[in-house]
Image: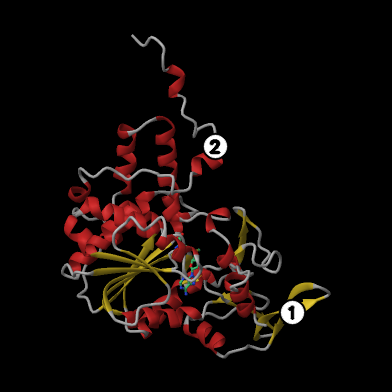
Amino acid sequence: MTFCEFMELALYWPDGGYYTTHSASSDYYTAPSAHPAFGALICLQMYQLWLLLECPRPFWVIEPGAGAGQLARDVTRFAQQLSPEFSKSLRCLCLERHPWGRRAGSTELGHLPNWIAAQGLPFQRVVGVVLSNELLDAFPVHRVRMEEGRLREMFVHLQDSELVERPGPLSTVALEERLRRVGVVLDEGWEAEINLAVDDWATQVSDCLERGFILTIDYGRDAAELYSSERRRGTLTTFRHHVQTDSPLREVGLQDMTAQVDFTALELAGRDAGLESWGRTSQRRFLLNMGLQGWLASLRSAINGAAYNGNRMGMQQLIRPGGMGDFQVMFHAKGVEPDSLWGLSVSSEIGPLLAGLAPPRLTAEHSQLLGASYPHLAQSYEHLWSGGDTT
Ligand SMILES: C[S@@+](CC[C@H](N)C(=O)[O-])C[C@H]1O[C@@H](n2cnc3c(N)ncnc32)[C@H](O)[C@@H]1O
């Protein structure tokens, strides 16, 4: 089978695929679970998109690959603080291929408004936003290698009870066409991943939007940077128990598998599907433009001790250079007059909107990153002073 078919089974096989049987938090954490400020500032960006669309009601925020639904929960909660009108218009719809989302919809999310757990894109066109975080990197990819001037595809075989990868003829000419389209020629011996599924994804997303935006957050790069000597072995990687294992053919179904997104291909796919690209920035820049710095500063006066340390660390993870801060935030639009977006440039409109709104704080739903990394800092020691004479 092609590597792509193998990855599809390893991640999504109903009887043992990784996403079918595992909760993500046991092997990796994502921005929504790192700190609720992520969802809150995305909510603020959604609010601007709602204004640009002239305040439609309902305003759909459809999130494919919602995982356990943390992002939608935090967006919905912050909307209630931000604007009652906006909150009443907001309809969050989580789409999830693996059962987590469906379970969550009927249980712990039941108390929140504007929530439907579902699978598959809606058939009827909606006005709103298609939002995804770390979805495209979880699409199965083809792996290729340049050998004697010819592009070959990697296949997975069983040999002496072990899985091995071997090159063979391309299963589809679309692989060569994709590299040509993004302007890349691999050097001899280089390996790379090609995510053909983004083409179909862009078409599906465009088809389900009457008017609106697509906000895609993921790790990846331009094609020229992705397919370069620095990444001559490709970017496919595996994670188990928060450790990068880089061994896709071992522990099949027990580890997460992912490859960086080619944002040049995504932009072209969007264009082919009738979407306009409105620009892209890093997650760090996006969150700072949306006001994260002010929230970091105000934390100190609002809380202290272990709570302060935990919240500060969670927020900083979101913008850490070399980590989530380097993720890309890309905007596409359909049927909307061009305008400038708050997340893509510094805007004087953000300050007044956030004034008086306290930053959301970590809850038990979020990852406790501080406790996991530095247990002594996550302890509260205030109780050692209780009961004593403080006069
Ligand atoms: C890396 S996880 C990210 C989860 C969540 N967005 C977050 O930030 O924590 C990727 C998720 O996308 C889901 N997924 C992959 N392909 C999908 C598709 N075509 N439709 C819906 N969900 C999909 C997987 O089941 C998995 O839960």
Label count reads 2
Q: Looking at the image, which residue sits at the far bottom?
A: 173
Using the image, tell me which numbered label, if any, was put on residue 374. 2
Rendered position, 169 above or below 302: below
Residue 173 visible in this rendered orientation of the protein: yes
In the picture, the quarter occupied by the C terminus is top left
The image position of residue 71, as x and y in percent, is: 38, 58
Q: Which residue is mark 1?
A: 157
| Residue situated in front as seen by the camera: 205 or 217 | 205
Rendered position, 368 above or below 345: above
The image position of residue 312, as x and y in percent, is: 41, 40
- Marked residue nearer the N-terminal end (1 or 2): 1
Using the image, tell me which numbered label, if any, was put on residue 94. none
Name the residue type under label 1.
Answer: His
In the picture, the quarter occupied by the N terminus is bottom right
Residue 345 visible in this rendered orientation of the protein: no
Task: Determine the secondary structure under disc 2.
Answer: loop
